[in-house]
Image (cartoon, rainbow, N blue to C red):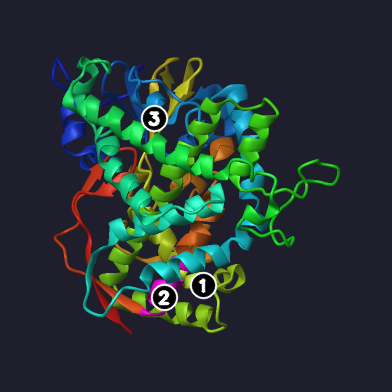
Amino acid sequence: MSVTPPGPLGDPLFGNGRQFADDPFGFLRACADSYGDVVRLDLGPRETYLLTNPADVERVLVADAERYRKPQFGDDAMDTLLGDGLLMSEGETWQRQRKLANPAFHNRRIGALAGVMADHAESHVADWEDGDVVDLQLELARLTVKIIVTAMFGADIDDEEVKTVQENLEPLGARFEPDPRRYLIPDWLPTRENREFDAAIDTLESVIDGIVERRRGTERDPSVDPAGPDGTGVRGPPGDPDADLPMDLLSVLLRARDRGEQTDENLRDELVTMLLAGHDTTALALTYAFYLLSNHPEARERVEGEAEEAVSGGSLTAGAVRDMDYTERVLNESMRLYPPVYTLFREPKLDVKLGGYRIPEGSALMVSQWVIHRSERWYDDPEAFDPDRWTPERRIQRPRFAYFPFGGGPRHCIGKAFSLLEAKIILATVCSRFELDYEGPSLALRGSLTMHPNHPVPMRIRER
């Protein structure tokens, strides 16, 4: 057995960096098809290993999770953007922040937010008219920004602030697109890209500061929690001094800061992380779901039928959308084909053995949803859109980590339940009233922190 995993040849200066930057999705899949369970890549200043077997992914994310950490790539941009928020923190810092955030994501509280989500969705589509063409990804991103700010920050955000957030996402995203030359350029060098990135962060932080300022002094007022002060949302355990206080994330963090358990920097990191991660992935998942439904009218008709049933009682509730079984299968299949988070990274804290190979401490492990979700090893006809592959009978035939759009293990996405409820409510709101027909070119993708369409997503609105 070879000591070193196989992998593609690269050029002397950039290794495989140019191949990855030119087409990250095609390159990763070609590597998986050609080299097997563990693929050695040269993508920058450290050795990188692509894992393509769900059994190895489960070991890294779940069974042996304590042996791995989030890697540092010698690039300060991620730390500058997200700091010690939940996505990037480690050890005791992560454990403390996760424990603080948990009440805001309790299942009972999430269920109580259904009305807030539905109200925002109804308000957003109220101005849509038959025959209009909209850039759907942009429309959905604006909607999900409003929902995350109301639900998790206990505040409203006006259209101008939403526009500011959206305008500054482009330079932020561009900073994380694959580019092998970036390792040669220090972050402190005042290049145009670095200046635009820093300016976008400053602008985004100013929006966050405005929201926090509006909330100062209200973190002990139960009426600011959109889950409601009437007991429908979660409260703390008996005897907890915060038991009857609002449990939106910003209230929780403000009270922790008052107790000396959070700094202003901690607060900023968590809010930026929540604002970006909390709206972008859901908007993208919905964009791809609507795109696929527009190309599969029979599936769209079934979703429309479930949507009509869900809204038939008047207002949308968590219970009503919970019964949208086929719609949930559509979402699962959409996130299989187009996972918004298309790859995760981990770093072994010590030498480990995976797939029969020794993986050295400090290397980068890449576990790619894009690769595994589209592998014919785990899926019949993997390129086809088939929501029925998510029936219980078919799903149980696949390895657990043949599908992991929300990650897995201790660091699985804390917002999974929130995102799925939000997505079903938005689908029910739209599909009960409209059909969306895609009128753009063949879908092209670009990789950044998340997987985005590489062009606008024009949809023509048709009233049903």
Residue 416 in magenta stretch = no
Mark 2, other Cα within 10 Å: few <14 / some 14–19 / many ≥20: many
Which badge, 3 or 2, is on the more N-terminal residue? 3
The first of marks 3 and 1 along the sequence is 3
Closest to the camera, between mark 3 and mark 1, is: 3
Q: Are marks 3 and 2 in contact (CB under 8 Å)?
A: no
Q: Quadrant of residue 64?
A: top right
Give the percent coordinates (x, y) of residue 233: 69, 57
Between residue 375 and residue 176, name the one nearer to us: 176
Q: Position of residue 364 (x, y in %)?
A: 38, 23
From the viewer's perspective, is residue 160 above or below residue 439? above
Mark linked to residue 324: 1
Q: Can I make out residue 464 in this image?
A: yes
Magenta span: predominant SS is helix
Q: Which residues are magenta?
A: 425-433
Q: Are marks 2 and 1 in contact (CB under 8 Å)?
A: yes
Asked whether, in this view, residue 328 is left or right of residue 219, the answer is left
Residue under pointer 2: 303
Distance from Cα at disc 2 to Cα at disc 1: 8 Å
Label 2 residue SS: helix
Residue drawn where x is 20% and y is 15% of the image: 184
Q: Amino acid at mark 3?
A: Leu
The image quarter containing residue 116 is: bottom right
91 vs 29, nearest the viewer? 91
Disc tally is 3
The tag on residue 104 is none
| Left or right relative to 120: residue 248 | right
The residues bearing labels 3 and 2 have C-alpha atoms spaced at a distance of 38 Å
**What numbered label is drawn on residue 81?**
3
Instruction: Look at the numbered disc 3 and give the secondary structure of its residue.
Output: helix
Crowding at mark 1 (Cα within 10 Å: few <14, some 14-19, many 20+): many
Which amino acid does the dot numbered 2 rest on? Val
